[in-house]
Structures are given as structure tokens and as C-alpha cells.
């Protein structure tokens, strides 16, 4: 399966701490994206990193991509209670109109 | 405001019944997608469409059907052949298919079996 896998499955931290979640995938990709989902809602796009990029920042988010290891990580700095959600990585495969999603990391930020 | 609208938010299906989930977008996007999400799971692709009057099966198309008669609309029918339809269904769109551009999602429809 092309589907990515996030690690850990669940993460609980205190407000103000950093949260790191990882994603591994299996085949060559065009890009990798991270999405956030609040309970019972649709997904919201957070950040996209292309296969020729190694690191990208957006506000409190930092994403890294290691294509040799087929892995990515998402770092949320100075977390807030409002960051509580599930986070998914999605891989876009060359020449296909498909996005493959992992099973997600459920983040709980305690106030 | 531009976006994707899914309706209804909750839907109940009786055994042997077909039900249709609506998805409308006003983003002028060419590509549209249907995903299924089971509790604690990731998203699995049911169908996708790159242009009007064309659509392709995803990884779990059995028991589902779609149409794409208008650019803005991509309804999903869950047929009686789908024996385990209870799930959260998400519709998404992107500017164009095949380029890996970001997806915009609707707020989802929770389908349950009576």
C-alpha cells in the first residue's frame, strides 16, 4: 500500500510544549502535505513540501522531508489548547490523481 | 465565500436503500474527490474526477457510484450493495488533478445504518 503511517498514534502534551509527529511512506512522491482535522469536521490543509525541498516553515509549523528515508516530520512549536486535533500526512504520487493519507496522529494539548 | 458544501450533515440509511450525498463547490476547481473515513482511521479514496463527465474509481469504489455532470457538483450514491456503509464521508476538490495540489475539504456527512 502507498498509504503513509503517522507516529505516534496519539500524543498528549502541556500547553507551551512542542509537538512532533512523524510520517513514513512507501514509494516516490511528488509532494507531501500535512492536514489537520478537528473532531467531526473536514480536513484543513496546513503545509505542502515538495520532493526537492528539505524543510519548510509556516508560522509555528516546521516540516521536514527526507526522501532517502521516505519520511517527514511536523513540528508544532509553543503548542496551544486550540491545536488539539488529529494531524494527517498525505502523499501525492507522480502522474496520479490520488492522495494517500496516513491514519493520523491525535494530539491533545492540555491547558 | 468560496468553499465546498456537503449535505446533509447526518444521514440514515435503511437496509436495501440507496442514498445520495451531495457535494457542491464554488472554487472553480477542476478535480473533485470522495473519501471515506472510519473511526480512528485515515482517509480512503472512493472516486475522483478530473473534469466534467469523467471520473475514476479509487481504492474502495465497490458499492458506490458517482456522476459529474457539472463542474460544481459531484454527488456520491451509496448503493444497497455497500454492506458496511457506516462511516464519515468527505468530499474534496483541488485546482487541477494530476499535479498534487492541495485539497480543500467539505465539512463531511456522517452516514449511519438504521
Image (spheres, rainbow, N blue to C red):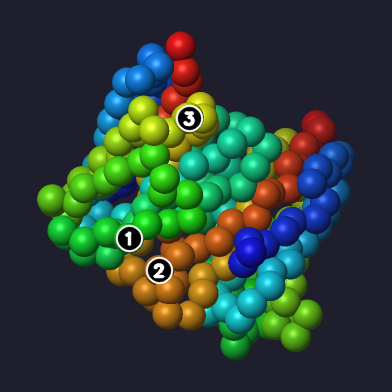
Of tags 1 and 3, the one toward the viewer is 3
Choose top left, top right, bottom left or bottom right for residue A109.
top right
Q: Is residue B86 visible?
A: yes
Residue at screen point 55% across, 48% down? B43
**Protein chain holding label 1:** B
Instruction: Confirm whether circles 2 and 1 share one chain.
Output: no
Does A102 appear above or below A110?
below
Which residue is label 2 attached to? A97
Residue at screen point 53% across, 79% down? A30
Residues marked 1 and 3 touching at CB (< 8 Å) = no
Q: Mark 2: which secondary structure?
A: loop
Does B22 appear above or below B3?
above
In the picture, the disc for residue A101 is none
Which residue is label 1 attached to? B56
Could you tell me how far apart the alpha carbons at marks 2 and 3 are, in whole angstroms? 27 Å
Q: Residues within 10 Å of mark 3 (few under 14, many from 20)?
A: few
Q: Mark 1: which secondary structure?
A: strand
Residue at screen point 30% across, 26% down? B18
Q: Residues within 10 Å of mark 2 (few under 14, many from 20)?
A: many
In the picture, the disc for residue B83 is 3
Amino acid at each position: 500500500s502507498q498509504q503513509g503511517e503517522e507516529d505516534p498514534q496519539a500524543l498528549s502534551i502541556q500547553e507551551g510544549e512542542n509537538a512532533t509527529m512523524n510520517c513514513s511512506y512507501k514509494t516516490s512522491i511528488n509532494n507531501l502535505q500535512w492536514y489537520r482535522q478537528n473532531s467531526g469536521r473536514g480536513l484543513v490543509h496546513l503545509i505542502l513540501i515538495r520532493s526537492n525541498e528539505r524543510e519548510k516553515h509556516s508560522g509555528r509549523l516546521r516540516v521536514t522531508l527526507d526522501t532517502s528515508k521516505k519520511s517527514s516530520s511536523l513540528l508544532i512549536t509553543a503548542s496551544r489548547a486550540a491545536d488539539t486535533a488529529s494531524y494527517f500526512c498525505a502523499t501525492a504520487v507522480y502522474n496520479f490523481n490520488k492522495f494517500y493519507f496516513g491514519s493520523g496522529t491525535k494530539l491533545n494539548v492540555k491547558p | 465565500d468560496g468553499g465546498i458544501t456537503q449535505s446533509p450533515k447526518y444521514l440514515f440509511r435503511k437496509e436495501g436503500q440507496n442514498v445520495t450525498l451531495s457535494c457542491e463547490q464554488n472554487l472553480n476547481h477542476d478535480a473533485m474527490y470522495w473519501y471515506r473515513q472510519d473511526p480512528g482511521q485515515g482517509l480512503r479514496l472512493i472516486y475522483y474526477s478530473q473534469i466534467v463527465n469523467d471520473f475514476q474509481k479509487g481504492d474502495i469504489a465497490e458499492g458506490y457510484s458517482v456522476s459529474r455532470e457539472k463542474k460544481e457538483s459531484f454527488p456520491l450514491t451509496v448503493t444497497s450493495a455497500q454492506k458496511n456503509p457506516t462511516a464519515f464521508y468527505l468530499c474534496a476538490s483541488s485546482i487541477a488533478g494530476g499535479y498534487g495540489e492541495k485539497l480543500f475539504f467539505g465539512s463531511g456527512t456522517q452516514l449511519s445504518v438504521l
